[in-house]
Amino acid sequence: MNRYPEIADRLMGLDEAVSRFVKDGCQLAIGGFTITRNPMAVAYEIVRQRVKDIHLVCHSNGQALDVLVGAGCVRRLEIAYGGNGRYAPTCVRFKKAVQRSEIEFEDYSNYQMSLRFLAGALSIPFIPTKSGLGSDLMNYEGFPPDIRREKKVASKKYAKMQNPFSEQRDEVVLLPALTPDVTILHAQFVGDDGTVRMKGLTFADIEQAKAADAVIVTCEDIVPRSFIRTDPDQNSLPPFFVDAIVKVPYGAHPTACYGFYDYDPKHLNLYRKMAEDDALFREYLDEWVYGVSSWEDYLTKVGMEMILKIKANPVIGYAPGLDRK
Amino acid sequence: MIQYSDNEMMALAAGRFIKDGDIVFAGTGVSILAATAAKRIFAPKAVIFFETGGIDPSLDEIPMAVADLRAMAGTSLNSGLIEAFSIVGHRKLHTVAFLGAAQIDRYGNLNTTCIGDYFKPRTRFSGSGGACDVATFASGVITFMQHEKRRFVEKLDYLTSVGWYKGGNSRKELGLRRGGALAVVTNLGVLRFHEETKEMYLAEYFPGVTIGKIVESTGFPIDTSMAVEADAPTPGELQILREEVDPQRLICQAVLAAPQK
């Protein structure tokens, strides 16, 4: 008997979701922002399946970005910000990968990347903004010309044009749309009809999802249609945008999930320390990614004590008084 | 004698710039300390918001990143990046942004991207994030810096975020309608920009700091003729900062690490 007949064909495990949708060389977008609502369980599964040559398109994806770059899954990166707030002012493996010329990278800003996802979602080829005028973001093309012809790589980083509606000099920057092969995101709720509800800030998750060819959503829980359709103003995505649904409680750990759990300061500090050293980072991956047999196993390693410490007060949304040093 | 940390002095010096009705774009670290101090001490009718989309959070605890759950608790609205940037540049709003940087030049242009060659950097930093965007759209930018010669440079290794660009009228000529660098707050003092040339000058030095120390910590010539000593924090200000703004003392005591967001 299937409890969720409406989404039965889309409900699957992490292994199937990744093997079906996250291919070698694919262009990937990640939901969440720095230390919040990163789809970590999916990121770990991508590492476990040793997906290669990913073209990652990011605004400010912190922890998932750093794990994927550090594990060698990423070949090409378009990025606005590689940092984890006070827990890593610059994401450590991202920093090393750039300094060692291990990845191809191109810089944009957060708003530029968000607009590029929006353009993809709107099915328009480019989008104008004033942001970037005078900045070296618009002076340095990160990617060499030979990869500009490759699939899903824009033929140039940006273009400038005169505002066609003005007689006076008025320059704008044009940014190429992004249409990732797959977007992965973590939500608080998915209805048993497939409707997605994200709580707290949505960052650019909605634009990223609508811009993508395929969308994997992990969630804290699957809830009845009667619940998710009672207050539809709260919902983020209709069911038809979602291709794979995986129920993964604590699936954003060690990043936070509003209303459910805070970020895990101890783990983020441990990660930064281990990421600083190549050998220790391999140990980190062995211990926390390759070496875990299931998500339950991962959470067991995190431990009940920390799970309880970071558990959010459901009214306040975070874990008040949590030791965040 | 009252004891206080660099971060506390910087937060209060920056907070004094904020007026009632200002919409304040905050980052983390000393930036959120300053924004919250501004609201609790100097401008209770200012509104704090984050590029991630959190608007007017209650800030009962201090966020450690702009995506911290504490930036989305008690807000008037939780939205996303596109909405947040529609506020930064809104023509009806006076928006002031707090930023940090690894390098700054005399026109208040900022580098948060790299030291050395862009393609093979000696040190890579986080990148623009929303910094280039708010530097483009906000009514004014206040930047927090550690005051060191290697950070106050003649020429940036990478110009991430535009201040007064090449000085004079050059920012406007780029096609940017408003904004520009309002002030730079360092661990030594407060710098502002000449009305016409848009060059940085020393406006205030903090108690216990000499003008000579600031001159030798700045990698380009700087006008000090208008400098005055800044007011030290009052016991009342420090009490609010420590007991209401940052009761867990996560940032009040910390040493500023750049670049920050």
Image (spheres, rainbow, N blue to C red):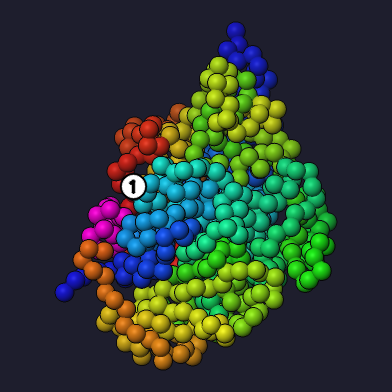
Task: Tell me residue A237's x, y (percent).
Answer: 63, 32
| Vertical arrangement, residue A262 with respect to residue B226, above or below | above
Which residue is at the front of the view, B39 or A257? B39
Q: Residues within 10 Å of mark 1 (few under 14, many from 20)?
A: some
- Where residue A306 sits in the image (x, y, percent)? 34, 37
Residue A123 in the image: above or below residue B49: above
- Identity of the residue drawn at 64% across and 14% down: A5
Range drawn in magenta: B238-253
Which residue is found at the position 57% from the left and 30% from the top?
A233
Q: Residue at x 32, y 87 (%)?
A: B210
Tell me the quarter of the picture where residue A158 sits: bottom right
Instruction: Please say whether residue A53 is visible from this viewpoint.
Output: no
Mark 1 element type: loop
Residue ID at (42%, 47%): B57
Q: Answer yes or no: is residue A304 visible.
A: yes
Question: Where in the figure is residue B137, as x and y percent of width and height?
Answer: 60, 63
The answer to whether A222 is drawn above or below residue B218 in the figure is above
- The amino acid beneath tag 1 is Asp
State the residue position of label 1.
B60
- A264 displayed left or right of A135: left
Q: Percent from the top left, x then y, of residue A70?
A: 55, 52
